[in-house]
Image: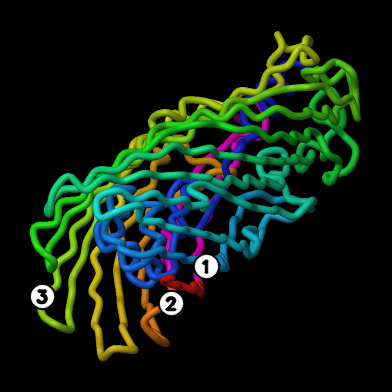
Amino acid sequence: MSSLFKKSLVATSLSLLAVQAHSAGFQVSETSVSGLGRAFAGEAAIADNAAVGARNAAALTRFNTTAFSGGLSIIDPDVHADVEATSPLTTDAKDIAPTEYVPNIHIIQPIDDKLAVGFSAFSNFGLSTDYPKDFHAGSIAGSTELVTMNFNPNIAYKLNDQWSIGAGISAIYADAELKRQKGALSLQNPPNGLGGNASDQVAKLTGDGWGFGWNLGLLWEINEDNRFGLTYRSQTDVTLDGKFTDGLPALAGGPTGGGPGTEVDGELELNLPEIIEFSGFHQLNQQLAVHYSAMYTGWDSLKELKATGSGCSANNNVCFQKEEDWDNSWRYALGATYTMDEQWAFRAGYAYDESPVPAEKRTLSIPDSDRHWWSLGTTYTANENLSVDLGFAYLDGDQVDGTEALTSTTSSDTDFSAGGDAYIYGLQLNYLF
């Protein structure tokens, strides 16, 4: 039973990542609502409000007065997962990704005609899933939540009429909680199973922590109607300190060796990937502009998830460990903005978001897939100081299949399918002082 636990629960059931319909991997793009309406095409070059501070620090030099933007995006996923099993337990899980709210706030302050500073608070990464407690595959798909917030001061300098550079630092706070249940492992009593109820908790992890990174930006303004932006955001390693709760009897070989309810200190290092983005903006005439972006995310930094603690002495101080080995991925976006008059502007965009999860690594906790974004948005300018953005995006996620083991024996492999769509709604207020 010790081998069963260590290879099934420790090696596969606890993952800090989970299915998300709104972004590949567990990346969050919702740094602005105006950007949402164009599928975030051209974000590093447009600089139509203060939210550009989250994408390109160099673009702060385009503002000659204090600028503020604050917004909220509501992400409403419709995600489902099914396991192919004959079981008295739930095998069809619907609506497993709860509605989430993603805020952002930004301010830019010019110092003179060349120097500007700014501050942005937003999220680059996050997830939330909640499978039924009696789900057949509860040991590999329970409830998971990761919340991050990036606090990012920036500074920019205008070298000449065409070139600006910018830089900033990021203080990223992360908070995570995950729980796993016995599921199908309860259907048989020891030594071949765990017995008890399917909803019995076999493991719980809670933790939070800080990580620090940096970002660079470059803006090339060929003229007022054509410009390009290039940005780099560093990999950030966040150490989550918290508690690991063992839910198994000591004889089952749990990592603490202490039995149900045993709580020990533990820590996990989460490697958030580097991000490189290139954007272009072109004002074709007085009313129509086109814009585009290509974003690279270095997901190969995510090699494994490993939580350690001296209290897990029964498993060489490893509370859990899971190989990931993700691939680097790209996101491509194309959009257009139509300015109808002094009050109204309308925008639309399309994006293709590659999944970083290799097919052979796909699991119920991470059944990630490629996504297609279709976005619409508008800006209402009330006066020379105040404007309001509305944005909407429909995300079409592919249906994917995979196989994952509930235990260390090949006979217990479980085939599954998962997929879903998402709807994102946003509202943002912009003000020039």
Q: Which residue is mark 3?
A: 284
Q: Which residue is mark 2?
A: 389
Span shown in magenta: 395-424
Q: Residue at x 66, y 23 (%)?
A: 307
Main secondary structure type of the part rendered in magenta: strand
Picture layout, residue 24 above or below residue 215: below
**CA distance for labels 2 and 1:** 9 Å
Sequence-wise, the earlier of marks 2 and 1 is 1
Q: Residue at x 63, y 65 (%)?
A: 99
From the top left corner, tell me how far across and down residue 183 is, in percent: 77, 43
Q: Is residue 407 magenta?
A: yes
Callout 3: 10 Å neighbours few (<14), some, many (20+)?
A: few
Q: Amino acid at mark 3?
A: Leu
Q: Amino acid at mark 2?
A: Asp
Sequence-wise, the earlier of marks 1 and 3 is 1
Callout 2: 10 Å neighbours few (<14), some, many (20+)?
A: many
Q: Residue at x 69, y 44 (%)?
A: 137
From the top left corner, tell me how far across and down residue 398 is, in percent: 41, 59
- Say which of 265 and 218 sits in front: 218
Picture disc at residue 71: 1
User: Residue 95 is drawn in which quadrant?
Assistant: bottom right
Classify mark 1: helix, strand or loop: strand
Q: Is residue 192 magenta?
A: no
User: Residue 40 is drawn in which quadrant?
Assistant: bottom left
Answer whether labels 2 and 3 touch (C-beta < 8 Å): no
**CA distance for labels 1 and 3:** 29 Å
**CA distance for labels 2 and 3:** 22 Å
